Image (cartoon, rainbow, N blue to C red):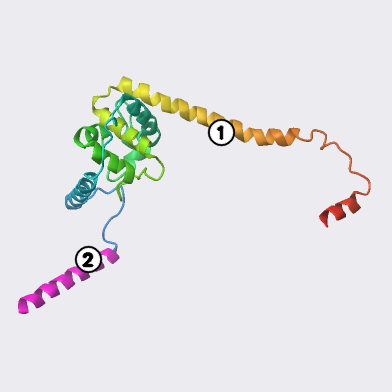
Amino acid sequence: MRTLVIIVVLILLAIAGTVAFIFSGAYDVAATTPHSALVKWALSTTSDHSVDSRAVSVEVPQDYDAPSRVAAGAIHYAETCQGCHGGPGAEAAELAKGLNPPAPDLVESGREMSAQQVYWVIKHGIKMTGMPGFGPTHDEQELWAMTAFVKALPDMSPARYAELTKKAEEEHQEGDEATAAGAMEPATAAGTEHPDSAGAEPAQGGGDQGGAAGA
């Protein structure tokens, strides 16, 4: 009985100490301060095992790594991934330097992780790492295309990477131009619908007519 009491007391003390530590503000949450070795190990190990246990249920399409999927994945990768992860011959954006933990090298991840694991991470993201889940914004075809591209990265030359991702830049530019053109159309239509309205003289008795219209 005494042993049980001691165990309960120790558990309560541990809980109280944890709560006190949380509210003390002693832990530095600044992204510019690296995690301690213990915290880094705990977070990475928890994350790895969490992904492993969930990714095993993912069914991989037989043709997920078809060249057409890889090419389609390059477009999404350039738009959503390159800024943080970079690519063969391409550096990550400046904002990636402030991430803690830093975004992993997907050339290495593509070599070490299974297609199931890559797909799961792309779809669901990882909490408290800056890695978003693309499931809410991308359909299954797009998610598997991105997976195929990441898995192809280890054997991809900088020249091939540049060739594939260039299409993304071209499509993005075309989209911006189309958006700009669409924004101009309403203004043009408004200006040409009544070309003589600006110079039209007000009709006589306009006050009475205006009152009637308002009524």
* Residue 56 visible to an observer of this rendering: yes
Q: Which type of secondary structure does the marked residue at label 1 adopt?
A: helix
* Tag of residue 18: 2
Work out which quarter of the rendered image holds the N terminus and state it: bottom left
Residue 159, percent across and down? 32, 20
Query: Please, which residue is most extreme toward the front here?
Result: 62
Q: Estimate the spatial distance between the alpha carbons at disc 1 and disc 2, rounded to whole Å.
A: 53 Å
**Count of marks overlaid on the render:** 2
- Quarter assignment of residue 189: top right
* Residue 21 included in the magenta stretch of the image: yes
Q: Nearer the viewer, mark 1 or mark 2?
A: 1
Rendered residue at 19%/35% (across/down): 112
Query: What's the magenta region?
Result: 1-24
* Tag of residue 179: 1
Residue 95, percent across and down? 37, 39
- Quarter assignment of residue 139: top left
Say whether residue 199 is left or right of residue 189: right
Rendered residue at 38%/33% (across/down): 76
Rendered residue at 17%/52% (across/down): 38
* Residue 131 visible to an observer of this rendering: no
Q: Which type of secondary structure does the marked residue at label 2 adopt?
A: helix
Query: Please, which residue is most extreme toward the top here?
Result: 159
Work out which quarter of the rendered image holds the C terminus and state it: bottom right
Give the mark nearest the N terminus, 1 or 2.
2
Look at label 2 and name its amino acid. Answer: Thr
